[in-house]
Amino acid sequence: MWGDKLFHVKHELEEIKNCPICGGDKIFSYIKCIDHNFSGDVFNVDSCESCNFKFTNPRPYEKTVYKYYQSDNYISHTSSKKGLLNNVYHIVRNYQFKRKFSLINSLITKEEKTILDVGCGTGEFLNYFKQKNWYTKGVETDKKAREYAIEKYNCSVDDTIDKIIESKKKFDIITLWHVLEHVYDFKDYLYKLKSMLNKGGHIVLGLPNCNSHDANYYKENWYAFDLPIHVSHFTKNDIKALVKEIGFSSLAIRPLVFDAYYISMLSSKKSGSNYIKGIYKGWSSNRRARKNQEYSSLIYLIKL
């Protein structure tokens, strides 16, 4: 098994009758995946016949899903660099900070710039922007990660966005790096985030792409399905539909190239293969994506 220790979780699941994006009621089973991180249980992904949106169904109730996050394999909630994968994750992450900063900084021309990072983990991304003289704010539901960000980097971090909404604070940039796929009512969440943007501001989403070559190759072993904590599995068309419905003015899409290597390494381990094959598959996925832009993960730059 993938995890060193697996714990059975009593099933408390809710079934979704209608597509969360288009509301269609014709849905079918798309794929079944094992939770290798924590429980060892099998979960199902459904697909909507009308719009092709894919979502975990049935899924844990929102009030009980926290049980599936209690795993040392959930790297974004730890600062540990033990083991090859942790080391690779942190090296690549630190390199990508520079690339992400360059991209985001180019979106805002004024001198005093503000950013809210939702799902900020242990705070390294926020701290990078803080050192570049941005006003920074974070949201992190995991208590240990949140406390680490506050104590280590002196970041201002809340446990939900509700307190920030009440303060009426507005931001130029709101980032969600591999977060929206965890959010249950993602439409309502995006509406709330929209209300927190300054005029001309951007929501920046980083999301795995289940239309990528590596997703199609690894199928049920594709690590970025990450059931059951990923409750939604987005594609470019899904985000385009949401951007139009919620009323943003424009959308640009960029690749997260390094994600293909990392996700493929994890997927290879999950399928009983080795890291070398995973690295090759990551390279192959990126090579194919140059033609159709279906990269393993994508950045969505959504302008108000």
Image (cartoon, rainbow, N blue to C red):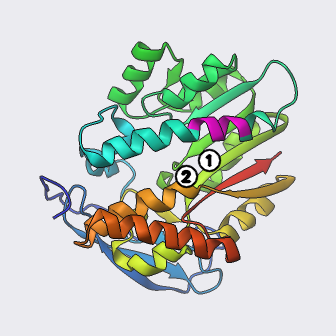
Q: Is residue 169 magenta?
A: no
Please provide the residue range marked out in magenta: 97-102
Between circles 2 and 1, the one closer to the viewer is: 2
Q: Is residue 64 visible?
A: yes
> Quadrant where the C terminus lies?
top right
Q: Given contact means CB atoms under 8 Å apart, are the residues at marks 2 and 1 in contact?
A: yes
Quadrant position of residue 31: bottom left
Q: Is residue 17 visible?
A: no
Q: Is residue 81 left or right of residue 116?
A: left
Sort mark 2 into few (<14), some (14-19) or many (20+) by Cα contacts within 10 Å.
many
Q: Nearer the viewer, residue 84 or 253?
A: 84
Query: Where residue 50 is drawn, which disc sits there?
Result: none
Q: Position of residue 145 (x, y in %)?
A: 37, 29
Q: Is residue 277 left or right of residue 163?
A: left
- Amino acid carrying label 2: it is Leu
Secondary structure at badge 2 equals helix
Quadrant position of residue 165: top right
Q: Position of residue 246 (x, y in %)?
A: 77, 56
Q: Is residue 258 left or right of residue 172?
A: left
Query: Where residue 189 is drawn, which disc sits there?
Result: 1
Q: Which residue is mark 2?
A: 180
Q: Position of residue 29 (x, y in %)?
A: 42, 84
Q: Residue at x 55, y 86 (%)?
A: 26
What secondary structure predominates along the stretch shown in magenta? helix
- Amino acid carrying label 1: it is Tyr
Q: Residue at x 37, y 21 (%)?
A: 148
